[in-house]
Amino acid sequence: MLSEKNFLTNHKASLVSIVLCTLIFTVSIPALAQSSNKRDSLAYKLQRLESTHRFNPKDTTHINLLVDLAFSYQYLDSDSLFSVANRALEYSRKINYAQGTIKGLNALGTYHYNKGNREKSMPMFKEALLLATEVEDIDSELTIINTMAQNYSFEGNYAEALNLNLKGIDLARKINDQQTLSVLNENIAGLYADQKDFKNALMFYDTVQKFNRKLGNEVVDAETQSNIASLYKDAKDYKNAMFNINRSISTFEKHKIYDWLAYAYQVKGDIYLDQKKYKWALYWYDQSDILFKHQIEDDRIQIQLMNGMAKVYFGLEKDSLSLEYAKKGLALSNKIKSLQGQIDCSETLYKVHKKNGNDPEALAYLETFKTLSDSLFMDKNKQSLSLLETKLQYEQEKQELIEANEAALAKQRNYIYFTVIILLILTIITFVIRRSENIQKKLNKELKDKSQAVIQREAQLHEINKTNTKLFSIIGHDLRGPIGGLQGILKMFADGDISTKELVSFIPKLKTDVDNISFTLNNLLSWGLNQLNGVVTKPKRVSLSYLVGNNIKLLSEIAKNKSIKIINQLPENPRIWADNNQIDIVIRNLLSNAIKFTPENGLITIGAEEKSGMWQISVRDTGIGMTAEMQRSVFKDSSNVTTYGTNNEKGTGLGLSLCKEMVHKNNGEIWVDSVPRKGTTFYFTVPKAQNKYQKAS
């Protein structure tokens, strides 16, 4: 193999690479012919069986050979896959052969899925899975679960993919199927990798490699290494990426695994492309393309290859070739309905047309790219993998409880047997019966208590999941938007799409977005800490005037922008007994809300009066007010709907529910009094500080 250094410094490198490509092209055809040995062997066995005088097409041996032959065509000849699988399914249904029906449905589902027809493929997979469950064919169940999980992952439906992989892991553990456990854990690693969560992805890949070492199959290990190489490429760790992909390529070439070899060549090309080493990237893409041109059919990988070659030619300033490959990739993406492929190829076409001054075409592809990207981002956000750790923890605790119950029952049985023997020897039958009854009642009570503990734990996990979902929804809605906008503008500036003058014009909007992000993050961090870990309230003597003054100063610029006047009517130096940080959050949220819902030239008044050992603080505004129904639901934490102020300001929907929790933790109450179109007053109480130290509640 040529070294990278020689390739870049030798003036004859281009000629050498062309010669090498030609040589590989000439040897690939016989090599690929060797890869068809298994398929030819199956076809030969089938031919011999069909030529016997006792041949029956509905014989299970014949059906099994048909299914195996169908799957051997998966990446080589899709039409043959369809026709052979269809025959196997037809024969199986006529004789009610469950295993043949399951495999036939799986093969046909695979054909339709590879063609981009999910509407036909998914019902077939589900029917096959249901039948496999009914006849308790665990091997077939695992095969179909793995296929469906990978397909859901490709569509971006990570939640369904995760559920199937976890279900498959449970089944594989029952029969101690190490190879399937390796595959399913690698699927989960792939889900993390797609979310760019490299740490957790590598953790699962470590588990996969442990299984692979036990299996001792270097081809399976090479498949994992090629996926790890792609992960390291995405993480910009090119050294580890190149180490893993070279090892996998060596194994695939040795064993003539040409579908995986085509993928490995493409990944190696991606690694060089990421480093802008275009000539080397093109060299490896050409090797992958040669394999695709000779019998291999895998549209999903070919889409990545087409777009990679388009990017290489764009980097080499061969725009016509770049357009050609990008259009091929886009056509293939549309054919099999690959959303990610459509996004990648549209982006490349936009860049090429923009460079060549074709503004209408560039704009059309840019709009397609942005629309599809937004759609994919929303889907990925909804299908976040953040619940995986909680679910795995729950499954582990459930298993531990089941094992503890089984151990308790085993201990009970042994004790009863031992007691019966002793009592038989001593002939104290009555005592034995009563003692056994008491033991049984005690153990039943323990089992009941443990069952109740399981139910309580499930409820806790449900609440944690609910909180996680709420937090991620808010982050996706109120943080992703401004941050995405900031990233987009900075990327456009970095790419030269906008000038410095145009960037400066965005600064007021960016400042507003950053202010919103800062305020939102402060509320989210307080809410998350309060909900997930619990907050220890540490009351002390606090100057209420200091807290109010700081928050007026903090929010004065926002109020000034709306010409709103804030009047501080607090009495002289009131002292409260409360947690400084929590009450600071309450005042800031109430004051921010008042500014948000008060129109321009409005008035906000902050006051306090002493009542029965408590300070009653009020925040009064001349804003839009609230209806009675809004007042009843305003403090509920079941809603995270964003509301908009008089100048279309955005909020998280967390503020008031957070205020309620903070006030209650400080032994106070909070309520609202409002009249629509006249204004709103929020009241809350906190204990008055005494001269002597008070105990924390």
Image: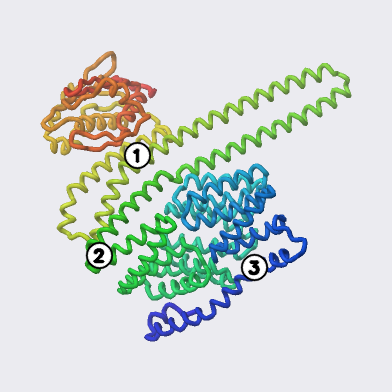
**Picture coordinates of residue 360 (x, y %)?**
23, 61
Q: Sequence-wise, which precedes: disc 3 or disc 2?
A: 3
Q: What residue is disc 1 on?
A: 474
Spatial separation of the CA atoms under disc 1 and disc 2:
36 Å
Are circles 1 and 2 on residues that touch, CB within 8 Å?
Answer: no
Identify the residue at horizontal 63%, vertical 53% (top origin): 90
Of tags 3 and 2, the one toward the viewer is 3
Q: Which label belongs to residue 38?
A: 3
Residue lying at the far top of the rendered structure: 612
Amino acid type, callout 3: Lys
Is label 2 in a helix, a strand or a loop? helix
- Place residue 400 in its image quadrant: top right
Is label 1 in a helix, a strand or a loop? helix
**Picture coordinates of residue 151 (x, y %)?**
50, 52
Spatial separation of the CA atoms under disc 1 and disc 3:
54 Å
**Picture coordinates of residue 24 (x, y %)?**
51, 79
Which quarter of the image is occupied by the C terminus? top left
